Amino acid sequence: MSSYSVTHPSLRQKWFAGVIVVAYALITLMPLIWIVATGFKSPSDAIAYPPKVVFEPTLEGYVNLFTTRTRLSPEALAAAGPAQTWYDEIVRQYDMVISGPSRYGERFFNSVIIGFGSTFLSIFLGTLAAYGFSRFRVPLKDDLLFFILSTRMMPPVAVAIPIFLMFREVGLSDTHLGMILLYTAVNLSLSVWLLKGFIDEIPVEYEEAALIDGYTRFQAFYKVVLPQAATGIASTAIFCLIFAWNEYAFAVLLTSGTAQTAPPFIPTIIGVGKDWPAVAAGATLFLVPVMVFTVLLRKHLLRGITFGAVRK
Amino acid sequence: MTDQSTDRAPTASRPLRGHVVRGLSDRAVAWIFIGPTILLLLAINIFPLIWTIRLSLTNYRANRTAEAVEWVGLRNYQRILTDPDIWHTMQATAHFLIWTIVLQVLIGFTLAYLINKKFRGNDLWTTLIVLPMMLSPAVVGNFWTFLYQPQIGLFNYVVGYLSGVDPSSFSMIGDVALAPWAIVIVDTWMWTPFVMLICLAGLRSIPESIYEAAECDRASKWRQFWTITIPMALPFLMLAVLFRGIENFKMFDLVVQLTGGGPGSITELTSINLKREAFEKWRTGYASAYAVILFVTVFGLASIYVKALNKVKQR
Amino acid sequence: MRALVQDLARLRRGPWEMLATVLIALGVVMLMQPVSLWLYTHSFVVTLVGTVMFIIVSHFPE
């Protein structure tokens, strides 16, 4: 018998596997590290050849991200007096002064409102529906569930055509409410499927006992089922939030100003000046929260991406 | 899947015993739970869908609402399905689809196989590898244009360093021959972890006893791999392939930010093409017919996908 | 082969679903193949038939 076994790999095999996986992880993380690093470079360091690995960190990218600046003539600059703050100081190096805030803050805030709003709604509706599907005889249950899932599969650009017309008709174009409703509809499929999986795992006997104790159906639902499903609800919520946070197609086609989220805005930061550090800074602030959430979610990732089918 | 959940499944999926609570029948309670979701989906999905089908039979243009709308029957469909340009768009999509799936399955499965050797710290590294797929494709695609810059881009520099080619001599995004591969590379970078995770679940679902039995029969490792590992992991692999297939068939955000469909229309995938027709040329009726064709295709693929999902669920 | 035909005639779900799946897959391949414009033109009908068939036969008994 050889020492090789599929079920009990030898130490050498483990080392071999480990080295390759770690190498892959390092390569695959390079672009992400590069985004974060570029955010702290000066514009000239960002476009240096060969690419600079060691550089002097600066917050220029972040200052440029959050401000608009105007160039002044030397006389006007002298008249403006010395720089008041550290960010003024950074801008003065380029003979410029800060003329106001940029729109990044607004766009980021829109992402937060629309993300949390739609997550709340889709979890609220999704939990109810998932409970209904899990515990009751619903006519055409499988068809309804399939229909709910299929809505998520549809190409967003194709869906956007009638939605665009509909929103224009009822005055929801470029509004927070419109985007919240739209993202809720898309996220419902995920929340219903995932939560149904979580609720299916809660033994039905608990509720039966509660019903015998004189609880109503609704009391049994929120006093017995909801607490048990809390972890599932939390991880489903994070999935919904990440989707709404990342979404681009609907956002770019259906919003232009007031309700525009960050993903369509970040690419426009680059402007004519090829200000890569500002773009990278914007991307970093936008992506890092998702990375943190991903780490928190790691136990439920598989469930999330397979609509609850694979449970590990 | 743990043993626990399979044990529980039959009890949990059984409907609750029929009580009539405060005059509400079970059916009424069920509709209170499910109703709001169905209503919202009717308003935001079904109603627009029916509207799209109606529009697809007209020559409506959303930017000229004053013009009279004429019924054109199936002429929009006829024009789309005989248009060689749209056919080429489909082929660009096919190139993207096939290569991303091949690469992601090969790399993803290999990684899953290696991670399944359970070396120390494999959980940590798995989590790190997964990071790209959770990020915003548009923002990531936008940043990759920076990595792809000739000369200053990190990607070009690394390729140049490893192969000896001058990094400023090629442009992944600007070159007609390279652009289709530029989008394949970024999508593979982003979504290989997805295939990896599902394959890993497949590998972990194979009971050890099967390998032990094969070991007793003195089956070679090679044979074990092809007669146990691959067939047992296949339903999971199918699931991953189908899902990536559907996702990349409708790919929009990543590629629009990366190449914008260029150079020329080399990387103009179906969704990008549709966006031009609907939101730049404003041929709404025509674009609606185009959308219906995509709907039906995705709907068909989605029904196969759900079948695959149920197959995996039974394990 | 005979068993398959028999199952189809008895309106069993399995083989019909398989048939619908094959039609959908065929339609998608026809849509994206680079060989013949004729196949591309007729892909939509094939996919549509497959999809509608799938919806119907998924209600057949096992």
Image (cartoon, helix red, strand yellow):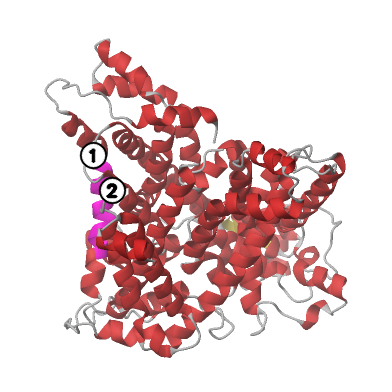
Which residue is under mark 2? Answer: A144
Residue at 64% in and 85% down: B176
Left or right of A158 in this view: A214: left
Residue C53 image point, x, y percent: 28, 65
- Three-letter residue code for mark 1: Val
Q: Is residue B64 above or below residue B250?
A: below
In this view of the protein, can residue A286 be seen by the observer?
no
Give the main secondary structure of the magenta stretch.
helix
- Element at label 2: helix
* Chain letter belonging to callout 1: A
Which residue is under mark 1? Answer: A138
| Residue stretch rendered in magenta on the structure | B36-49
User: Was residue B151 drawn as part of the magenta stretch in this picture?
Assistant: no
Along the viewing direction, whichever of A165 and B234 lies nearer the viewer: B234
Along the viewing direction, whichever of A282 and A244 lies nearer the viewer: A244
Left or right of A211 in this view: A33: right
Q: Quadrant for residue A98, please give it.
A: bottom right
Quadrant for the N terminus of chain A in the image: top right
Residue A112 image point, x, y percent: 48, 45
